[in-house]
Image: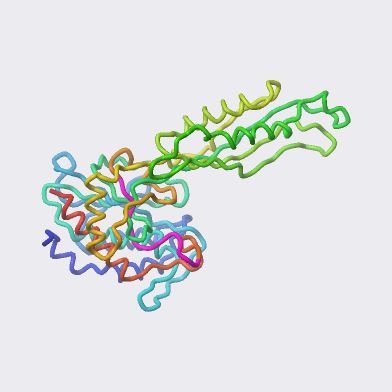
């Protein structure tokens, strides 16, 4: 028996999802989708606000200063372009955002409206630009005790995810005539030992018990100005998928030092993280035995999901909420046996899975709020 509020009977997550998927909310403009979300909350008697960063916020239960526990439900309303129109095919809803992340939003909203927080507090925090720079999430200051982030996990409870950093390695030498190569310092040739340093960078690092090893991948290279000249400059972009406890600055300094040790002394070396207005999405990990994990896992099994506990394979805004206990959970999948689902032309979500996600989240909240 749950303590769900009677007024929640009026909310149908599938009806909400059908209307939401039909709304174009690419990362260029989420105004229409945010308006629909706000109208939905208002129609269920819930006061909501939009902060200066574009986050839609609503809370139920005790005041923040007096609550016995604060549970935050988070996801995003933006989608990657281009918009893919809504279609309903039996128990399958297709269209952009159906699984990433309007399906998870529908399930989170159902649980938020259903639960009676009592002396606790439940906050719904929906961000506007997760697929871009996460300026909304970076601006949040919610002081939650527990966080559930809605993303397509197939009803598995995801307790960890790798972070993602990106930066440019700059190698500098001295230009010279290609007929006299020893009279200069070849910055492109210095790539050879630099790439060796990349391959060896994680050789002595233990893999994370849940996420496995970090990865470091060279992606874009540029160098040289003329075909008959020893190149004085060369740049290489690298993609880093990190695991705890590595931070963006920790990676930057360690990587620059590793390349400096590998190349000749006469080659200049610098490495700079790509400039962005918000922090990079760093890795996070919540202990699998934490109450939040065990409660949501059990609720997922009871609702018809597997209840599996595993890492999430993509970076998420959960990074901004750690080290508070945080999990990623929701209906839908990033990819299936056929190929990509999220961000793909064939994006879809199962109607029964959305309902099971809503049921699991509601039951978990009923157990987690005192």
Image height of 305 relative to 280, above or below: below
Residue 322 visible, this orientation: yes
Q: Which region shows up in magenta?
A: 326-338
The quadrant the N terminus occupies is bottom left
Residue 49 visible, this orientation: no
Give the residue displayed 22% in from the left and 55% down from the top: 47
Q: Main secondary structure of the magenta part?
A: loop
The percent position of residue 348, horizontal first and vertical second, equals 42, 68
Give the residue displayed 82% in from the left and 33% down from the top: 229
The percent position of residue 162, horizontal first and vertical second, equals 43, 44
The percent position of residue 10, horizontal first and vertical second, equals 20, 69
Q: Is residue 329 magenta?
A: yes
The percent position of residue 253, horizontal first and vertical second, equals 52, 27
- Residue extending furthest bottom? 90
**Disc count in the image?**
0
Q: Is residue 348 magenta?
A: no
């Amino acid at each position: 028996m749950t303590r769900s509020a009677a007024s929640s009977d009026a909310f149908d997550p599938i009806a909400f999802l059908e209307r939401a998927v039909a709304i174009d909310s690419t990362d260029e403009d989420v105004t229409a989708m945010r308006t629909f979300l706000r109208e939905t909350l208002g129609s269920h008697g819930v006061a909501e606000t939009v902060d200066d960063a574009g986050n839609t916020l609503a809370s139920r239960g005790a005041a923040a200063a007096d609550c016995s526990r604060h549970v935050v439900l988070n996801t995003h309303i933006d989608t990657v372009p281009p918009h893919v129109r809504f279609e309903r095919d039996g128990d399958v809803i297709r269209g952009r955002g159906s699984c990433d992340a309007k399906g998870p939003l529908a399930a989170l909203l159902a649980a938020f409206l259903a639960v009676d927080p009592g002396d606790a507090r439940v906050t719904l925090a929906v961000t506007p630009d997760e697929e871009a720079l996460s300026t909304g999430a970076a601006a949040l200051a919610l002081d939650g005790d527990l966080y559930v982030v809605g993303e397509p996990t197939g009803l598995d409870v995801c307790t960890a995810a790798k972070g993602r950093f990106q930066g440019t390695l700059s190698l500098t030498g001295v230009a010279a005539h290609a007929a006299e190569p020893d009279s200069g310092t070849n910055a492109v040739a210095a790539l050879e030992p630099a790439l060796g340093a990349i391959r060896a960078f994680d050789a002595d690092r233990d893999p994370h018990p849940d996420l496995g090893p970090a990865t470091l991948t060279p992606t874009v290279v540029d160098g040289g100005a003329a075909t008959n000249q020893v190149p004085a400059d060369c740049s290489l972009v690298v993609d880093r998928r990190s695991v705890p406890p590595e931070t963006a600055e920790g990676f930057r300094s360690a990587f620059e030092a590793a390349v400096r040790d590998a190349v000749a002394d006469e080659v200049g070396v610098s490495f700079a993280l790509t400039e962005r207005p918000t922090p990079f999405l760093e890795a996070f990990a919540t202990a699998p035995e934490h109450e939040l994990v065990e409660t949501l896992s059990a609720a997922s099994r009871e609702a018809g999901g597997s209840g599996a506990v595993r890492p999430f394979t993509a970076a998420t805004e959960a990074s901004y909420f750690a080290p508070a206990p945080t999990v990623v959970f929701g209906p839908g999948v990033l990819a299936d046996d056929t190929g990509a689902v999220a961000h793909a032309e064939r994006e879809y979500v199962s109607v029964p899975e959305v309902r099971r996600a809503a049921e699991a989240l509601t039951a978990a909240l009923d157990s987690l709020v005192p």
